[in-house]
Image (cartoon, coloured by chain):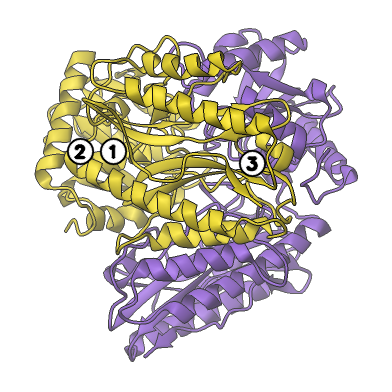
Chain colours: A purple, B yellow
Amino acid sequence: MNRRSVFTKAEFSRRIRDVKQRMERASFDLLVCQDPANMSWLTGYDGWSFYVPQCVLVHLDEELPIWFGRAQDEKSARLTTGLPARNIVPFSEYLVQNPDGHPFDELAELVRLRGWGRARIGVEMDAHYYTARCHAHLVKGLPGARFSNNGDLVNWARLVKSEPELALMREAGTICSHAMDRAIGKMHPGVPQNEVIAELYHAQIMGVDGLGGDYAAICPLMPVGDGTATPHLTWTEAPLPQSGLAILEIAGVRRRYHAALTRTVHFGKPPQVYLDIANAIVDGVDAGLEKARSGRTAEEVEAAWQSVLRSRGLKKESRVGYPIGLAYPPDWGERTVSLRPGDRTELQPGMCFHMMAGVWLDDFGVAISESFVVTDKGGEKLCASPRELIVVE
Amino acid sequence: MNRRSVFTKAEFSRRIRDVKQRMERASFDLLVCQDPANMSWLTGYDGWSFYVPQCVLVHLDEELPIWFGRAQDEKSARLTTGLPARNIVPFSEYLVQNPDGHPFDELAELVRLRGWGRARIGVEMDAHYYTARCHAHLVKGLPGARFSNNGDLVNWARLVKSEPELALMREAGTICSHAMDRAIGKMHPGVPQNEVIAELYHAQIMGVDGLGGDYAAICPLMPVGDGTATPHLTWTEAPLPQSGLAILEIAGVRRRYHAALTRTVHFGKPPQVYLDIANAIVDGVDAGLEKARSGRTAEEVEAAWQSVLRSRGLKKESRVGYPIGLAYPPDWGERTVSLRPGDRTELQPGMCFHMMAGVWLDDFGVAISESFVVTDKGGEKLCASPRELIVVE
């Protein structure tokens, strides 16, 4: 029945085995996973239903995960997962956005009915859709259980990608480079910003070489002019300026796997300072990629990058990167490792990161990022876009 | 400085006054609003930064709201809101995805510093991004405060749209109809599904008649074949079938205001039963629209629709509609009223709804929805797409 997933049953079994080992080490009997990427990674489930409470349960004593969600999405679970009917459990429709009852009242009932009412339960306290109310209803409905934060246990299990996952990441990189190229080709002074974004979306979804594209966990970001001093502005319909900067941050997405990329355009002849910053960023990324090999740590990648920046009199205060892969809105980051001082996570082949290399000053910013896979020889870039300040005259 | 918002300072003042009156009635001194649509409605703030904790505070004694967010987004707040610098408060970068500290530790500190440590605080317990961990850190940091669920107080304040908002809703409807028309024009047997979606995204973002489009809070949904039995599946790259059904659910978006629409296509000559269901849906929507006038209630709209369905031997179990307007991912619904039995909310002119009219059976579904504004004379449709089962031969 699993018509959509590209992964074998053996791959799902391996993932669940890995998660159960982590659960044993962390002393959990039961995990409640609401992060849509975790739900998908554990079962193959795919659908835009994460705006209502739903989750996947993993119990040490249960061979397969259990999908719990809205009744009208039950059929999606049957079509996109390989789970048996017994492991697909819908909640009652009247509980959707109900000020009194909550879907997780029925989740608590399900847990009790399976005999897990006194389990040690790990929840994702900071997953985007695990709201304060989800937690309150679940805790109230399971007074005999012991709850604690599972520390994004499944996100950590997702950190090292399998070969089939890496194949999708590389395809995502190809789609990303192509979409960036198409969008930049549209960027000329006077062109309405939304025309660039329309072209970009078209390229993202068409994909390339018969590899269709998927929706991105973050919409295209395109700060323009003094907006480049801040990273998360979206487009308007104003025309692109005759001179000055614009930054484009996008992802290519292949079956929910993301490769992200940022490039900066200057309209007209750029001041030397912008060119110098762009060169520092590219050199800093090279220094980071060189360090991004097995056995090195997350903070060493950041230190290598920061050292180049400092040598040019620059700095970037926020972390310079985060893991990427399978993702749903609102973030393509995986919320585990950060490429920043103090993060001593040891790098392993198959980990994938977005090195969000940029310099943001008071009134402008320049960013030239790369997505990469950790290998024994350093970071392997997933995209192949020109690495420079792109000048449009 | 507020270069992006289309709303006047007077409109923002009116909104804040309304919210403060609601706070007084509900006995709150302080609101913590994390729903990105509430943040935007209160201040004009716009940017894809809602994947990290952030919020807008409204206190009875403070004239203007306070924006609280990530340091790198502070400049976005300066560019998109009209707030004075004193009311824009960044949190420290190292707290982003930090397993020990949390941005809301600094939010608690801000609340204490302003002298509100013993306030009666209303939080959005079920807003998508107000996680269990956000709540836990805020409560811990404010031991003298009294917390309770504000029951989506600001969402309720957003229910009746102002004239400038209605102007955007109508523009969104125009964009939506146009995008639907373009997508359906692409739908032919054998066409890869992602080609239809690429065309659709292009049309959504280009907009129409010089009105640029914005990103939608939900990606285009396109269940095909037996997938039509469930509403939230997205596309694949498989070709559209030679015969059978496909459903397309989309929104047109104008400056974050959404008009949503669903249409159903049949490839080849449709069985009579599909035509009968489509007719029942269109008639049911007409019956609902007729009731959607000032003074009637939400449940009366649903009852009118349900009565037509029942007379044709059909039923739809889930609620048939919800309010729409200003929205950010993951939902374009406003999480307040539901068009379902038991919801006695009295309709007022300027309320906007998506009547998600469809029938989902075990192995297929048909949906033909409308977005509308409540008026004295009934529901005024925001879109103008043909209302029928669309047959592609």
Quarter of the picture containing the C terminus of chain A is: bottom left
Q: Does label 2 or label 1 sit earlier along the sequence? A: 1
Q: Position of residue A21 (x, y in %)?
A: 82, 35
Q: Report how far apart the C-alphas of labels 2 and 1 lie in the structure.
A: 6 Å
Q: Position of residue A308 (x, y in %)?
A: 50, 78
Q: Position of residue B254 (x, y in %)?
A: 33, 51
Q: What kind of residue is marked 3?
A: Leu
Pointer 1: what residue?
B56
Q: Nearer the viewer, mark 2 or mark 3?
A: 3
Q: What kind of residue is marked 2?
A: Pro
Pointer 3: what residue?
B233
Quarter of the picture containing the N terminus of chain A is: top right
Closest to the observer, B359 or A306: B359
Left or right? Give the position of B3 relative to B358.
left
Q: Quadrant of residue B231?
A: top right
Q: Report how far apart the C-alphas of labels 2 and 3 lie in the structure.
A: 39 Å
Is the same chain shared between marks 1 and 3? yes
Q: Quadrant of residue B178?
A: bottom left
**Which type of secondary structure does the marked residue at label 1 adopt?**
strand
Q: Report how far apart the C-alphas of labels 1 and 3 lie in the structure.
A: 33 Å
**Which type of secondary structure does the marked residue at label 3 adopt?**
loop
Q: Does label 1 or label 3 sit earlier along the sequence? A: 1
**Chain for mark 3?**
B
**Chain for mark 1?**
B
What residue is shown at x 46% (from left), y 20% (from top)?
A: B305
Judge whether residue A312 can be spotted in this image. Answer: no
Pointer 2: what residue?
B65
Q: Nearer the viewer, mark 1 or mark 3?
A: 3
